[in-house]
Image (spheres, helix red, strand yellow):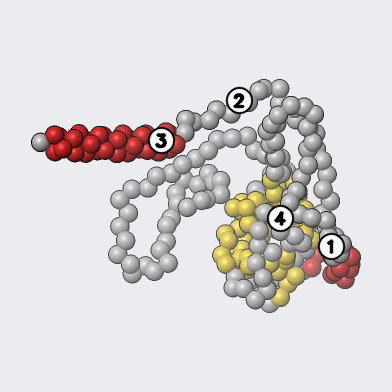
Amino acid sequence: VKLPCTKAKYLRLTWVKPNQAVHLKSLVGHYQMQNPKPQQAIDLGKPRVEAGTWYFEKPSAIAFTELRFKAPQDGLLYKGTLYSRPAKDSEWRYQTRFLQYRLQLSHALHTSSAIELHHSTERFWKAELEGDHQFTPSQLPTIEGQWQQQTLIYLAKGAEPFLLAYGNAAINKAQNSGISRVIQSLQQSGEKPALVTLGDTTHNTQRIDITQSPPWRKVGLWLVLLLGTAMLAYMAYSLYRQMNQNTKA
């Protein structure tokens, strides 16, 4: 069971069917310490409000790791449950509970930390608020989604110079790729594709030697083949000696 990073001391495990006679003998937890990767953020705007529920969606299949409800002014608190689904006709799935605030206390501004997600690629989202809070349009938060940048590692093979390319070399060039239809659909929907930019190139001067393990499987097959051949030769020799003895007798 993968969990987002949390500092909570106590965790609760609830069964889907509480009547099942399940007994846990032990629990083992694994954690990993690593430097955080740089984050990228996208502004999703204000949510759409319907019957006290907030709705918003992502413009592309970005794997969100964090969400923030950025309050426009001090003294606002948002508390509720977050759900998501991949398509409009799919069922809503529980993601997490959240508590977002922006409070001015003792001449200091206090803001909540981001809502942690586990690389969720769902497109449609909704937030069900707790309590009878009625927020005016000016009090609605701006939703910000964040995701981690990906790192590609290329291992050089052979002698220089090298050609760095990204894609599938097996795909042939098409006469009608349909790019015009893609552009037309984007213009009709009003969506803007995200821009791809290149960061700094990291050169690794350390040589990486790839060691291959011995082919034990091939060695075993050859040994079996040699043993089988030796056994056949021994049986043939024994049969030959027996035939010679019978002839002399």
Asked whether, in this view, residue 121 is left or right of residue 10, the answer is right
Asked whether, in this view, residue 28 is left or right of residue 105, the answer is left
> Tag 2's secondary structure?
loop
> Tag 1's secondary structure?
loop
Label 2, label 4: how far apart the Cα atoms are: 35 Å
List the single residue furthest toward the left.
Answer: 249
Label 1, label 3: how far apart the Cα atoms are: 51 Å
Q: Residue at x 67, y 39 (%)?
A: 37
Asked whether, in this view, residue 29 is left or right of residue 61, the answer is left
Q: Amino acid at mark 3?
A: Trp
Q: Which mark is residue 177?
A: 1
Label 3, label 2: how far apart the Cα atoms are: 28 Å
Q: Amino acid at mark 1?
A: Ser
The residue labelled by disc 4 is 62
The percent position of residue 245, horizontal first and vertical second, equals 14, 34
Dot 1 or dot 4: first in sequence order is: 4
Q: Residue at x 86, y 68 (%)?
A: 181
The percent position of residue 199, horizontal first and vertical second, equals 80, 38
23 or 87, nearer to the observer: 87
Q: Residue at x 77, y 27 (%)?
A: 160
The residue labelled by disc 2 is 209
